[in-house]
Image: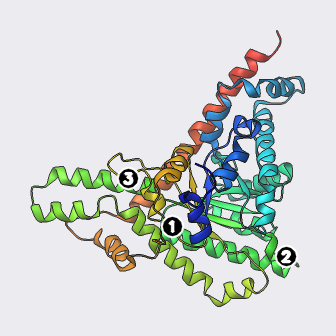
């Protein structure tokens, strides 16, 4: 499919004001010209990366061997070699997306890189690493990913106040999103007060979607097995697969409230960029659900959807774009409220806490696996 009006990805961007980013980055994509092709044919406007993505990219891929050997000769540690590989890929991707960044006046064209997931609960280290990554990569269209943990949010405020672009990740609850938005606003206020140009700073709030349904649906299934009450079964079935999208729709309503606040309007008057909600974890995990459900149902202005390659191709083929983020809002509130019904009795706060802990672990495991694999490769490539 080419860059034509018939491609739903272009419709999503041009008619509905949502940017499509890709949740994937490898050196092969950069060097082969595939990344440039995706910009031209899939309306790609940015890239997000994480330790899991880099583990898949680097382990078992000979394209990195020459740089690993150069790192060995330079006496670098395994962690320094890892960073040299990843930073090089991020810089090259930033360069490819620089025209997008410039054409959109800093709205899009960003490449996100995450600080080490092992420091997700450490504010001071997160600030230190975010500064170091930003300076080392040295590209104006890089975004530093910081987890939206209680310890991460003060770090977000601080680095935003220093003019560093931030992608706040692992957001699950509406409350955590709201706290993230105000951390961005406070950071921007400090940046502007110190004489900074608000238009030169950007941020997205990465709100995770499908993992919520995976968790809630598993609880629903367990309850369905325990009851023979048809009324209770009906209530449980009625919300299956619907909680994640309802939660996102409510978050978007909060976004609208925040950008209409006096504090935000004062920053907007100084050229500040809105912190867009970015829908993350939008590949469909349950084969019973439509493969692009978390794209079609979350199209709306001033948002981003970051998709893995397979979902991008599925969307190019059969997405059905419409401005649905504000459709059925009363129903969204009703779905979330129904979780408190004694027949359903699912504690959403508990779900969100579980998902945050799991999310950090899902990044720590591949990060440690990658460094272990890299250590093995370094030994193999080190001259005897």
Q: Nearer the viewer, residue 118 or 374?
A: 374
Residue 316 falls left or right of residue 159:
left
Residue 72: % across, % down: 84, 24
Give whichever of discs 1 and 2 has the lower sequence position. 2
Residue 4: % across, % down: 61, 57
State which quarter of the image contains the C terminus.
Answer: top right
The secondary structure type at the circle numbered 3 is: loop
Residue 79: % across, % down: 76, 35
- What is the distance, in whole Å, between disc 1 and disc 2 at their CAs? 30 Å
- Judging by the rendered image, the residue that carries numbered circle 1 is 299
What mark, if any, has residue 40 been given in the picture?
none
On the question of residue 27 being in view, the answer is yes
What mark, if any, has residue 290 been given in the picture?
3
- Judging by the rendered image, the residue that carries numbered circle 2 is 197
Verify CB contact (< 8 Å) between mark 3 and mark 1.
no
Residue 12 to residue 265: above or below: above
Badge 2, how many Cα within 10 Å: few under 14, some, many 20+? some
Q: Residue furthest bottom?
A: 262
């Amino acid at each position: 499919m080419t860059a034509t009006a018939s491609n739903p990805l272009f419709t999503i961007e041009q008619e509905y004001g949502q940017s499509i980013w890709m949740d994937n980055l490898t050196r092969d994509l950069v060097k082969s010209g595939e990344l440039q092709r995706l910009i031209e044919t899939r309306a790609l406007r940015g890239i997000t990366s994480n330790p899991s993505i880099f583990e898949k990219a680097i382990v078992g891929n000979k394209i990195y061997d020459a740089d690993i050997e150069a790192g060995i000769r330079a006496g670098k540690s395994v962690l320094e070699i890892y960073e040299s590989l990843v930073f090089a890929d991020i810089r090259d991707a930033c360069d490819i997306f620089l025209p997008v960044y410039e054409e959109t006046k800093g709205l899009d064209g960003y490449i996100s890189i995450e600080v080490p997931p092992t420091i997700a609960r450490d504010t001071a280290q997160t600030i230190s690493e975010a500064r170091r990554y930003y300076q080392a990569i040295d590209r104006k269209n890089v975004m530093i990913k910081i987890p939206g943990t209680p310890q991460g949010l003060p770090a977000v405020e601080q680095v935003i106040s220093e003019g560093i672009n931030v992608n706040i990740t692992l957001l699950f609850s509406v409350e955590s999103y709201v706290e993230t938005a105000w951390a961005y606003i406070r950071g921007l206020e400090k940046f502007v007060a110190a004489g900074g140009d608000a238009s030169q700073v950007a941020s997205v709030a990465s709100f995770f979607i499908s993992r919520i349904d995976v968790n809630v649906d598993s609880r629903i299934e367990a309850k369905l097995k325990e009851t023979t009450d048809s009324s209770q079964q009906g209530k449980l079935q009625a919300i299956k697969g619907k909680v994640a999208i309802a939660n996102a729709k409510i978050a978007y309503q909060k976004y609208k409230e925040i950008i209409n606040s006096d504090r935000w309007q004062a920053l907007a008057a100084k050229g500040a960029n809105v912190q867009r909600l970015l829908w993350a974890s939008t590949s469909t995990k349950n084969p019973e659900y439509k493969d692009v459900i978390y794209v079609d149902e979350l199209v709306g202005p001033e948002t981003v959807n970051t998709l893995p390659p397979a979902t991008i191709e599925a969307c190019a083929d059969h997405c059905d774009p419409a401005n649905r983020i504000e459709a059925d809002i009363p129903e969204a509130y009703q779905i979330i409220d129904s979780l408190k019904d004694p027949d359903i009795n699912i504690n959403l706060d508990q779900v969100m806490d579980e998902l945050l802990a799991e999310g950090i672990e899902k990044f720590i495991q591949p990060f440690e696996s990658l460094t272990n694999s890299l250590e093995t490769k370094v030994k193999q490539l080190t001259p005897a």
